[in-house]
Amino acid sequence: MLKEVLLPDLGEGIDSADVSEILINPGDSVSIDDIILVLESDKASMEIPAEDAGVVKEVFVNAGDEVKTGAPLISIEVSSGSTEESKPEPKEEEPKKEDKETKIETKAPEIKSEDISSDKTFASPGVRRLARELDINLTTINATGPKGRITKDDLHGFIKQKMAQGGSVGAVSLPKIDFSQWGSIDEQPLTKIQKITGDRLQQAWQTIPHVTQFDEADISVLNKKRIELKKEGEKKNIKVTFLPFIIKAVIKSLKEFPRFNCSLDHLGENLVLKNYYNIGIAVDTPTGLVVPVIKNADNKSILGLSEELMDLSERARTGKLKPDEFKGGCFTISSLGGIGGTNFTPIINPPEVAIMGVSKSIWKPVYDHKNKEIVPTFMMPFSLSYDHRVIDGAIGAAFTSFFSNAVLDVSTFE
Ligand code: CAO
């Protein structure tokens, strides 16, 4: 059965609208509720859904046309059994002469009230479509267009702002899969920390253009100093690991390259350079990864940093950190050196712009160009992920080189 779709009564005193988008072509198959056209009046934008499944025969309008209520929009060859009307009906009267060969039914689709801006927002179909795709509620956007219309710039500004804040612009849904169909399974809920950290990591990964630079540093000098201070620490019950030395060398590098000690402002247009050095440390806890912050780390000694690290990591593992102790970080260090691995790509901890990943140090043969000999050297592999909007590759490489030299200079650790 061939059916003509007519422009329905749009209500609200609207008797015509412009065709802004045609989403189907003759020959396309459509299902019930597929959007076939988008119309725009001076009051609202509307999507016209297909009320029947079938194949589009003809499109009577072009984008930009003004159409009046009752005007034919398209015709559809309706598949049998796809409409309410196709249920067995009582016997019809003989069709009129002109309808004898092909029965043409004309009907206006029912526009649901929400299609006519039931959220009381005015926006073009393009803006509505993008908002829908990104799961953005238009009512949360400040409209700057005439008569309170949400413009394309308003939507783009909103998305930009969300991204600069490290916020999500929409939810990501996963398909529901029954894994038990392939074998036995156990289910375990994520902890609250894992959920929060997971969301933040996902946002950071999706919204920050990450680059990771790999390098390795000769830590022979660092290690000598550590062995020295380790003995001193033992007398005071303080464990001296590599990490406080790395913190010192990072701070020296941040002072040399202030871009690594900054954040992008909420508009993503200005850099906020910080004159303080608060270092976040990734701590693995039974309930998930947390990042407490050592405040003003530049004013602390190796033993002072070691003591604070012991305290923070212990309280992180027992869930005793206060909310304030997670705030105000400038740069994060994630050390897996005590566990293993040669290198990894850490994810930036927004609003910071860079993070260092430290891997397990090993003794390895290194060629000494000056003396033309192979020397066993204690090498520490490390990586640096940075936000490419703020930091260029050349500075990224310069930072890691500077850091590698800093750990060879014993004065770095004073
Ligand atoms: N190379 C070789 N050995 C290293 C090392 C390195 N780069 N870093 C640490 N070690 C050694 C330490 O010196 C210590 O050995 P000793 O007892 O002989 O001195 C041992 O490994 C264990 O160190 P540690 O882990 O207790 O202490 P730390 O200061 O190095 O690290 C902390 C503290 C809290 C950062 C760490 O315990 C931790 O939680 N790391 C995991 C961080 C994490 O999960 N990051 C991943 C984030 S992305 O998913």
Image: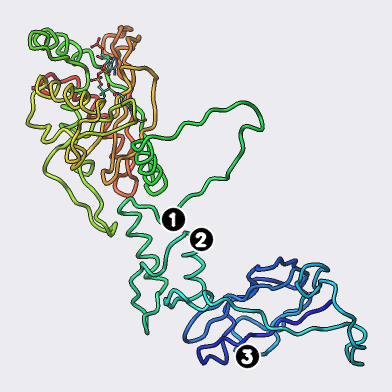
List x then y, in percent, for residue 35. 63, 70
- N-terminal of the pair, mark 3 or mark 1, is 3
How crowded is the residue under tag 2: few (<14 C-alpha within 10 Å), some, or many (20+)?
few
Q: Which residue is mark 3?
A: 69
List x then y, in percent, for residue 233. 11, 12
Gap between marks 3 and 2, in whole Å? 29 Å
Task: Pick the residue in front: 121 or 254.
Answer: 121
Residue type at numbered disc 3: Thr
Gap between marks 2 and 1, in whole Å? 9 Å
Task: Pick the residue in front: 407 or 167.
Answer: 167
Residue type at numbered disc 1: Gly
Task: Pick the residue in front: 328 or 88.
Answer: 88
**Callout 2 touching callout 1 (CB < 8 Å):** yes
Residue 162 image label: none
Query: Which residue does the image show at 60% across and 40% down from the upper left?
Result: 177
**Callout 3 touching callout 1 (CB < 8 Å):** no
Q: Which residue is mark 2?
A: 133
Q: Which residue is mark 1?
A: 170
- N-terminal of the pair, mark 3 or mark 2, is 3
Location of the N terminus by quadrant is bottom right
How crowded is the residue under tag 3: few (<14 C-alpha within 10 Å), some, or many (20+)?
some
- Which quadrant of the figure has residue 202? top left
